[in-house]
Each structure stands twice: as C-alpha cells, then as structure tokens.
C-alpha cells in the first residue's frame, strides 16, 4: 500500500528559502505582466495557488484586482504580507496557509492562477490531477485556470547539468537532470544557506490528458509569456476554462 504524501513537506523547504527567494528570482519578470493582464481581464477576484512571496499577487492587487493567495509555507506568506503592506495593498491580498491540492478557499472566482512552475513540485500525475481538480473546483462558471510548467529541451540539460551557475549576485544554483525519471534536482546556495528541491516534469500530451480528466477545457497553450504558440522544448503556459463539454486539443 502506497503511503499518502506529506502535504506539508515543502513548507520547511520554502521557509528556509524565504529570506532569499526574491533576490534569487529577481530577474524573473516576464511572467508578472502576463498574469496581471489575465487578472485585470477577469475582473477578479483571483486565487493564486502557491502564492509564495507575492511576486505576482501583489502586482495584481496594485492593478486593482483583489487576490486570495494560498501557500503552505508560513515563511513565504510572511514575506508576501510585508510586500503587500509596503505597496499599500494589504487590504486586497488575502493570504491563507494551505496546500494547493486542498486550498482553504470557499469562494468561487473567475480566475485561478498557479505561476512559476509550482505544479512541478508534485511528485506524480495523481497529485498533479488532484491540484488541477482543486483549481477547477474554485472556478465560477466560465472561469479560467492559468498555469505554467516546463519540459526541458536537450540544450537546457546539456548547458546546465551538474554545473554551479551564478543565478544572481551571491546566489548560485545547480541543476541535476534525470531524464529517465523526468526529475530536476535544483540546489540553491546563498551564503551559508543551501536548499535543494526536486521538480517533476511531464510532456505536453500528459498535461493535456490530466487537464481533460480534471474537467477543464484547453483554450490555449503558449510557448512563452508573449503568447507565442508552443513549439516544443520550452515553457508551457496553459489557459484552461470551465466552458465547453470537451477539452480541445491544441495542434
């Protein structure tokens, strides 16, 4: 009998990284505008699963859209709360401690987002499907679920495998890729602190199947946040909705 995964297992990890998460990801900005535009178009409110330090939730609130942010790391939520307060939008950022597979959200909203590849922390297809179904369950009729993930290209693997690279000044990271198991062990080092975590990727067809099983329709699949068509070997930005009887496979 397979044991149920510990739904709080990433909380200590992200508590450990909370103090330097924003400096580590400071150059990742291309997704912020994309998600802000999605939020504004939805009219809000928005639920963000794995809200982290508020890197996307706070700009959404600054744009005038209320956000319910869910994360299982108290340390990350503390950073997000401080960020929202600095930006004067704490009243529009409702932060809740919880797991993205069982989010503590009773509201039904027009948009749910899960940015920055957060679904890849889930170890297998069963857990990913749980998260997709949970997101679908938060949507009002006609609502949308938007998330991004990746499947690495051969070039990505060859250029980074096993090498320490400076991600930002004073912050290094090392990627160890395991193609047979389709896992990435990413280690981040900042000063005396070193944290490792594992991401589990799927290919496009597997995501399509899971999205359909979750009862969602596929509206679009982009290859980047500028909405270019997906061509393979790159990020996947999925736009799904509750509309339609069947999911549409994107050719």
Image: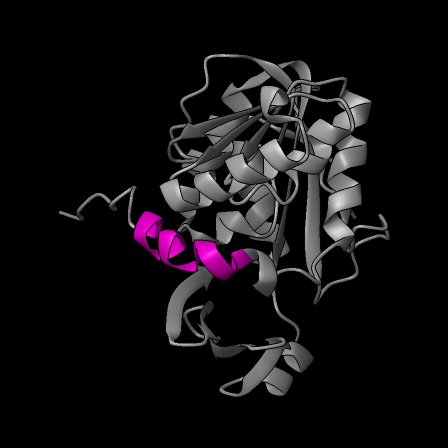
Confirm whether residue 88 shows in the render.
yes
In magenta stretch: residue 17? yes
Q: According to the image, what is the colour scheme of the structure?
A: one colour
Q: Main secondary structure of the magenta part?
A: helix
Residue name at image x 73 percent, y 49 percent: 31
* Front one among 44 and 117: 44
Q: In this picture, is 85 found above or below 43? A: below
Residue name at image x 38 percent, y 73 percent: 194
Q: In this picture, is 214 found above or below 11? A: above
Q: In this picture, is 225 found above or below 134? A: below
State the image coordinates of residue 29 (x, y, percent, origin top left): 74, 54
Q: Is residue 219 left or right of 53 when viewed as pictured?
A: right
State the image coordinates of residue 163 (x, y, percent, origin top left): 53, 88
Residue name at image x 53 percent, y 19 percent: 138
Q: Is residue 45 left or right of 12 when viewed as pictured?
A: right
* Front one among 165 and 99: 165
Q: In this picture, is 241 found above or below 171? A: above
Residue name at image x 42 percent, y 48 percent: 125
* Magenta-drawn segment: 10-21
């Amino acid at each position: 009998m397979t044991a149920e995964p510990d739904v709080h297992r990433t909380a200590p990890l992200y508590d450990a990284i909370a103090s330097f998460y924003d400096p580590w990801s400071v150059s990742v900005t291309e997704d912020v505008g994309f998600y802000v535009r999605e939020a504004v178009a939805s009219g809000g409110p928005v639920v963000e699963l794995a809200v982290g330090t508020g890197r996307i939730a706070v700009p959404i609130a600054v744009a005038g859209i209320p956000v319910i942010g869910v994360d299982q790391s108290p340390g990350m939520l503390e950073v997000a709360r401080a960020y929202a307060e600095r930006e004067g939008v704490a009243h529009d950022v409702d932060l809740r401690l919880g797991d993205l597979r069982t989010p503590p959200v009773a509201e039904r909203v027009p948009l749910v987002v899960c940015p920055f590849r957060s679904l890849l922390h889930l170890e297998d297809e069963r857990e990913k499907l749980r998260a997709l179904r949970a997101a679908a369950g938060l949507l009002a009729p006609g609502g949308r679920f938007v998330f991004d993930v990746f499947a690495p290209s051969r070039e990505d693997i060859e250029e980074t495998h096993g090498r320490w690279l400076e991600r930002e000044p004073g912050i290094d990271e090392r990627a160890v890729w395991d193609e047979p198991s389709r896992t990435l062990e990413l280690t981040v080092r900042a000063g005396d602190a070193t944290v490792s975590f594992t991401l589990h990727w799927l290919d496009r067809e597997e995501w399509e199947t899971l999205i359909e099983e979750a009862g969602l329709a596929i509206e679009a699949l982009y290859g980047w946040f500028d909405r270019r068509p997906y061509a393979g070997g790159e990020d996947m930005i999925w736009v799904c909705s509750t509309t339609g009887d069947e999911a549409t496979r994107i050719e």
